[in-house]
Amino acid sequence: MDPRGSSPRPLLLLAVVLIVGRVSLEPFLSLTFAGEGGPQTRQLSQSRSAEQTAGFGKKEKPKWMKRKKVKMETLQADHGDKAETVAEVLAGRSPAQTPEDMVRARFSAARAGDGLFLAKTEIDMAKKLERRAKQWLITLGRATKEETGEYVDPTNTTKNLQSIERFEYIGTEENKVEFKVHCTAGILHETSIFLEDETYGWVYNKPESMDWL
């Protein structure tokens, strides 16, 4: 048998296979091995990136860790020429220079429902910060037992502080501040004792006297 007569057939068959293979594989090859930055490559990369990062975005803070910003107009209405000072204390840009400054800042935090600020600026060695912040949120009517896993005894203070209206400063004697918190259901008349603190300037220690009028 003449080898020259049989060789064209295998060569022809090989050529057909290569052509067919090129036609069928070309879309795949262009998708996966296209030049860097090609539209198909970018599309595939973006798709994979979206799939890989789905559900892994920035984790939202728990409710008890969220601070509440108080508008300057509100601070001015509540504290007059002390508004700027109170804003600095609330924002953490400046420690309270006097016990009065901290009383005012804590009032505004309570009115805004900022349990975290109230928890940070009080002394309570028996409870951790998280627990205190959660209990403040319940007291102020901003969270429930089911949401926080904490319980607060229902008292006049708990009920009345959920409807705060205005602040009345009476006076300061050394580290004691006398004031009133006017609420819809009553008036809290309190004299609070404060202690100096390196971070916040002054922090709430305990009440010397507290009455609902």
Image (cartoon, rainbow, N blue to C red):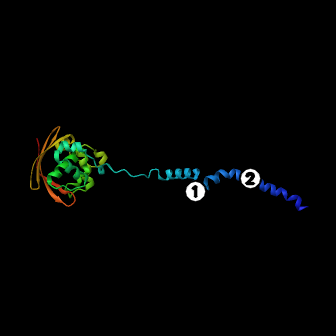
Which amino acid, by three-letter code, is at mark 2?
Ile
Residue 208, image x and y in percent? 10, 52
Q: How many marks?
A: 2
State the separation of the CA atoms marked 2 and 1.
26 Å
The residue at 19%/51% (across/down) is 85
Residue at left 74%, top 53%? 19
Q: Is residue 170 toward the left or the right of residue 85 in the image? A: left
Residue highlighted by disc 1: 36
**Outermost residue toward the right in this view:** 1
Q: Which of 180 and 99 is in front in this view?
A: 99
**Whether label 2 touches label 1, CB < 8 Å:** no
Q: Which residue lies furthest to the left in this view?
A: 173
Residue 20 shows which numbered tag?
none
Position of 169 with respect to 34 (left or right) is: left
Quadrant of the rendered structure where residue 2 is? bottom right
| Crowd around label 2: few <14 · some 14–19 · many ≥20 (10 Å) | few
Residue 213 placed where, x, y %?
10, 41
Q: Which residue is drawn at 16% across and 59% down?
A: 196
At mark 2, the secondary structure is: helix
| Viewport quadrant of the N terminus | bottom right
Q: Nearer the viewer, mark 2 or mark 1?
A: 1
Q: Residue 19 carries which label?
A: 2
Three-letter amino acid code of the residue under disc 1: Glu
Image spot of residue 3 (x, y percent): 88, 62
Mark 1, Cα crowd under 10 Å, few <14 / some 14-19 / many 20+, is: few
x and y percentages locating residue 34 in the rendered image: 61, 55
First in sequence: mark 2 or mark 1? 2
Residue pictured at 47% horizontal, 52% vertical: 53
Image position of 159 (left or right of 63): left
Image height of 168 relative to 198, above or below? above
Nearest to the observer: residue 42 or residue 120: 42
SS class, disc 1: loop
